[in-house]
Image (cartoon, rainbow, N blue to C red):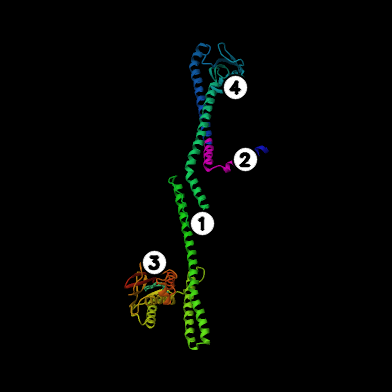
C-alpha cells in the first residue's frame, strides 16, 4: 500500500513538472483511449450480433429446407458442416434421438431443447461440456394434436468460429488502436511542442527582461520576435510587446521626470545662490560703509533690497511651479466665471504705465469673453508675456495685445516687433530656467521661469500656449476653453 502511495506521488510530481506540450499530448492520448475503447466495444458488439444473426439464419434456412423432406420420408437429417443434426421423437415429454442423427456423447441438453420444441421453433445457446458453446435451433417436423408429442428436428452449430472471428477482430482492434495511440501521443507531442514554441520564446524574452537592470537604464530593447503560431499566439505576442513598450515608455517618462527634477533642484539652488552671494557682499560693504563712508550706505541698502526682491520673485515662481506640479496638494488656482477682456484691459493699463518706452496696441472685443478661470493667474500670464515683450526687445519696439473668441476657444496674443527667437530656442523657451542669452537676461532681472510659469498656468486651465517668431515679429498665443 505504502509502495503504491510512493509510486503515485512520484508520478504526480513528474506530471506536475512536465511541459505543457507533453501534458496536452498525454491528455489527448487519454481522451483517444476512451474514444477507441467505446468504438472498439461497439464494433465488437455489432460484429458479434451480426455473426449470431447470420448463424441463426443459416440454421433456419437449413432446417426449413429439410422439414418437408423429413415429413415425407422420415429419413435421417442432413449433415451440414460440422453441426450436430438430429431428429428427436418426443413422447410423453421425453425426446429420443432417431437413428442417423449426429449428436455429442451427452445427448441430454439437446434432448431437453427438443422436448420444448414440440410447441414451436426455438433458438437456444448452450454450453456443451468440453466442446464450448453451441447455437441450437429446434423446430417441430410433426406434432400431435395437443402439441406435447411429435418429431423435432434439431441443429446445433458451434459458436467457436464466431467467437474466434470476434476475438481476432478484438485483437486487431487493440493492436491498431495501440499503434494509433502511440503515434498520436508521439506525433502529438512533437506537433504541440512546435506549436507551443512561440510561447516558450516569449517566456525566454520575459527571462531576458528579468535579467535586465531596469534601475540603471530606461531602455528595454527586448521584444518577443517571430511570426505565426496562430491567432491567439499572435494576439498574445502583440499584447506582450505592447506591454513592454508601455513599460519602456513609463520607465523613460519616470527617468525623464527624475532627471528634470534633479536639474530643476540644481538650477534652483544655483539661481538662489547668486542673489544670496550678492546680498552677503552688499551687507559687508554696508558694514564697511557704516564705519567709513556713511553716504554710501543707502546705495548698498538699496542693492540689498533689489536682490531680495529678485530672490522673492524667484522663490514665488518656484513655489507656484512646485504647487502646480504636485497633484496631491490643492492647485494654486481658484477658477470662477470671469471676463478675459477685463483682465486684458487691466494688464494693458499696467503695461502702459510701467513701460512707457514701448508703444502698446490693444485689440479687445466689446462683448465679454467668458471663461471659467482664475483671473489673478491669467493676469500673471499676460503680465509675464507683456514683460518679456518689453524686456527682450529694444526701447521703442511696438507691442500688441489682442483677445478674440472663436470655435469655443478664447485666444489671447501678445506680439512684438523685436529681434525674434531662433527656431532652436523656440523649442526650449518654455523650459524652466531656460534663457536665450544668459548674461543679458540675467542682467535684465530675468529668472528663466517666466515662460515656464505661463505654460504651467495655461495647462492647469486646460489651455495651450505657443510661440511663433521670426525677426521683427514674435507672437505668443494663449488658447483657453470658453466657459459653457
Ligand atoms: P526670463 O525671466 O529670462 O524672461 P522667460 O522664461 O520669461 O525667462 O523667457 C525665457 C527666454 O525667452 C528669455 O531669456 C528670452 O531670451 C526669451 N524670450 C521670451 N520672450 C521673448 C520675446 N518676446 N522676444 C524675444 N525673446 C524672448
- Region rendered in magenta: 8-33
Mark 1–mark 3 distance (CA, rounded to whole Å): 30 Å
Residue bearing the label numbered 2:
10
Closest to the observer: 137 or 182?
182
Left or right relative to 206: residue 3: right
Q: Is mark 2 within 8 Å of ligand 1?
A: no
Residue depth check, mark 2 versus mark 1: number of the one nearer the observer:
1
Read off the residue under disc 3: 427
Q: Are marks 3 and 4 in contact (CB under 8 Å)?
A: no
Q: CA distance from mark 2 to mark 4?
A: 48 Å
Horizontal and vertical percent position of residue 101: 56, 13
> Circle 3 sits in a helix, a strand or a loop, which is it?
helix
| Residue placed under numbered mark 1 in the picture | 214
> 314 and 370: which one is in front?
314
Label 2 packing within 10 angstroms: few (<14), some (14-19), many (20+)? few
Image-quadrant location for residue 417: bottom left
The image's mark for residue 127 is 4
Is residue 22 inside the magenta stretch?
yes
Amino acid at each position: 500500500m505504502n509502495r503504491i502511495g510512493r509510486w503515485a506521488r512520484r508520478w504526480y510530481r513528474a506530471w506536475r513538472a512536465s511541459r505543457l506540450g507533453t501534458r496536452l499530448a498525454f491528455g489527448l492520448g487519454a481522451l483517444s483511449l476512451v474514444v477507441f475503447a467505446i468504438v472498439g466495444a461497439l464494433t465488437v458488439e455489432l460484429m458479434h450480433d451480426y455473426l449470431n444473426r447470420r448463424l441463426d439464419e443459416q440454421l433456419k434456412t437449413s432446417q426449413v429446407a429439410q422439414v418437408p423432406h423429413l415429413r415425407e420420408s422420415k429419413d435421417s437429417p442432413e449433415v451440414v458442416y460440422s453441426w450436430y443434426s438430429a431428429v428427436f421423437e418426443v413422447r410423453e415429454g421425453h425426446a429420443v434421438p432417431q437413428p442417423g442423427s449426429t449428436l455429442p456423447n451427452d445427448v441430454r441438453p439437446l434432448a431437453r431443447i427438443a422436448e420444448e420444441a414440440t410447441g414451436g421453433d426455438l433458438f437456444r445457446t448452450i454450453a456443451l461440456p468440453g466442446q464450448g458453446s453451441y447455437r441450437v435451433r429446434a423446430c417441430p417436423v410433426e406434432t400431435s394434436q395437443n402439441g406435447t408429442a411429435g418429431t423435432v428436428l434439431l441443429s446445433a452449430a458451434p459458436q467457436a468460429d464466431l467467437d474466434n472471428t470476434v476475438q481476432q477482430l478484438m485483437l486487431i482492434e487493440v493492436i491498431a488502436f495501440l499503434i494509433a495511440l502511440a503515434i498520436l501521443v508521439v506525433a502529438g507531442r512533437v506537433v504541440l511542442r512546435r506549436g507551443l514554441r512561440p510561447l516558450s520564446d516569449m517566456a525566454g524574452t520575459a527571462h531576458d527582461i528579468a535579467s535586465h537592470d531596469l534601475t540603471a537604464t530606461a531602455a528595454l530593447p527586448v521584444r518577443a520576435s517571430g511570426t505565426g503560431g496562430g491567432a491567439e499566439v499572435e494576439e498574445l505576442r502583440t499584447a506582450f510587446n505592447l506591454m513592454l513598450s508601455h513599460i519602456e515608455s513609463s520607465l523613460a517618462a519616470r527617468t525623464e521626470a527624475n532627471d528634470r527634477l534633479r536639474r530643476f533642484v540644481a538650477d534652483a539652488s544655483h539661481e538662489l545662490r547668486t542673489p544670496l552671494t550678492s546680498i552677503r557682499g552688499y551687507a559687508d560693504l554696508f558694514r564697511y560703509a557704516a564705519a567709513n563712508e556713511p553716504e554710501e550706505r543707502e546705495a548698498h541698502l538699496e542693492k540689498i533690497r533689489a536682490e531680495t526682491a529678485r530672490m522673492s520673485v524667484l522663490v514665488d515662481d518656484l513655489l507656484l511651479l512646485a504647487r502646480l506640479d504636485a497633484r496631491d496638494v490643492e492647485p494654486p488656482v481658484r477658477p470662477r466665471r470671469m471676463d478675459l477682456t477685463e483682465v486684458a484691459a487691466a494688464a494693458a493699463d499696467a503695461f502702459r504705465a510701467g513701460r512707457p518706452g514701448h508703444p502698446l496696441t490693444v485689440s479687445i472685443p466689446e462683448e465679454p469673453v467668458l471663461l471659467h478661470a482664475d483671473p489673478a493667474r491669467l493676469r500673471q500670464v499676460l503680465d509675464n508675456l507683456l514683460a518679456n515683450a518689453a524686456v527682450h526687445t529694444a526701447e521703442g519696439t511696438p507691442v500688441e495685445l489682442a483677445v478674440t473668441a472663436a470655435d469655443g476657444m478664447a485666444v489671447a496674443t501678445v506680439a512684438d516687433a523685436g529681434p525674434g527667437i531662433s527656431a532652436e530656442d523656440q523649442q526650449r523657451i518654455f523650459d524652466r530656467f531656460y534663457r536665450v542669452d544668459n548674461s543679458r537676461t540675467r542682467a535684465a532681472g530675468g529668472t528663466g521661469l517666466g515662460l515656464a510659469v505661463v505654460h504651467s498656468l495655461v495647462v492647469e486651465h486646460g489651455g495651450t500656449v505657443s510661440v511663433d517668431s521670426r525677426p521683427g515679429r514674435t507672437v505668443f498665443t494663449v488658447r483657453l476653453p470658453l466657459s459653457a
